[in-house]
Amino acid sequence: MKRFTQVALGIAVILCLAGVAMAAGGATKDECVAKTKEAGRMVTDKGVEAAIAEVNKKDGMFVWKDTYVFLMDLDGKMIAHPMSPALVGKNVLDMKDKGDPGKLLFVEFVKVAKEKGEGWVDYMWLNPGDPKPRKKVTYIYRVPGKNVLAGAGVYE
């Protein structure tokens, strides 16, 4: 029985350490804020087209760990998305929160950008490979003086 307890305890420790390692590997909220503002500076310093080109790269500087930055205009058109290129050029204002069909997710993004300039939006979304929607929070940052917002989010 003592041997079984030692093995069980060892497995528990390994699982805990694996969980900590996996958690440490995920993007953080602070990184989302920093990366969206970095994308905003690129829009300002190098122009919208240069920022779009970089954000659209799956292996670019705006894709890290388990998340990425996307760019939208304030009219609801996705202008850069490294993970879902099919969305680029489309108006996404009619896309709904997966947990609350009455909540128009991208309308919320635009509202935060226009009214506050920056902030967090929480919603339910499908994580690739997971059949059930999970809570996600996305930081929205309006590029000063531009008709563009940058966003990046993490699953909670």
Image: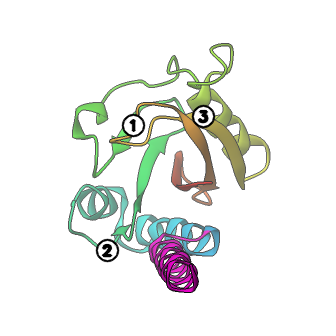
The mark nearer the N terminus, 2 or 1, is: 2
Q: Are dots 2 and 1 in contact, CB under 8 Å?
A: no
Q: Residue furthest top?
A: 102
Q: Residue at x 55, y 21 (%)?
A: 96
Say left or right for 110 vs 10: right
- Between discs 1 and 3, the one toward the N terminus: 1
Q: Quadrant of residue 74?
A: top right
Marks 2 and 3, how far apart at CA = 26 Å
Residue type, numbered disc 2: Met
Instruction: Name the mark on residue 124.
Output: 3
Residue lying furthest front in this view?
Answer: 1
Element under label 3?
strand
Q: What residue is drawn where x is 45% and y is 35%?
A: 126
Looking at the image, is mark 2 or mark 3 earlier in the sequence? 2
Quick one: SS at disc 2? loop
Residue stretch in magenta = 1-28
Q: Closer to the camera, 127 or 17? A: 17
Say the numbered circle drawn on residue 2.
none
Q: Secondary structure at mark 1?
A: strand
- In the image, residue 72 sits, relative to residue 105, either above or below, namely below
Q: Quadrant of the C terminus?
A: bottom right
Q: Which residue is mark 1?
A: 78
Looking at the picture, tell me which residue is in the foreground, 36 or 27.
Answer: 27
Magenta region, mostly helix, strand or loop? helix
Q: Which residue is mark 2?
A: 61
Vertical position of residue 19 compared to residue 72: above or below: below
Q: Position of residue 145 (x, y in %)?
A: 60, 56
Magenta highlight on residue 155? no
Q: Nearer the viewer, mark 2 or mark 3?
A: 3
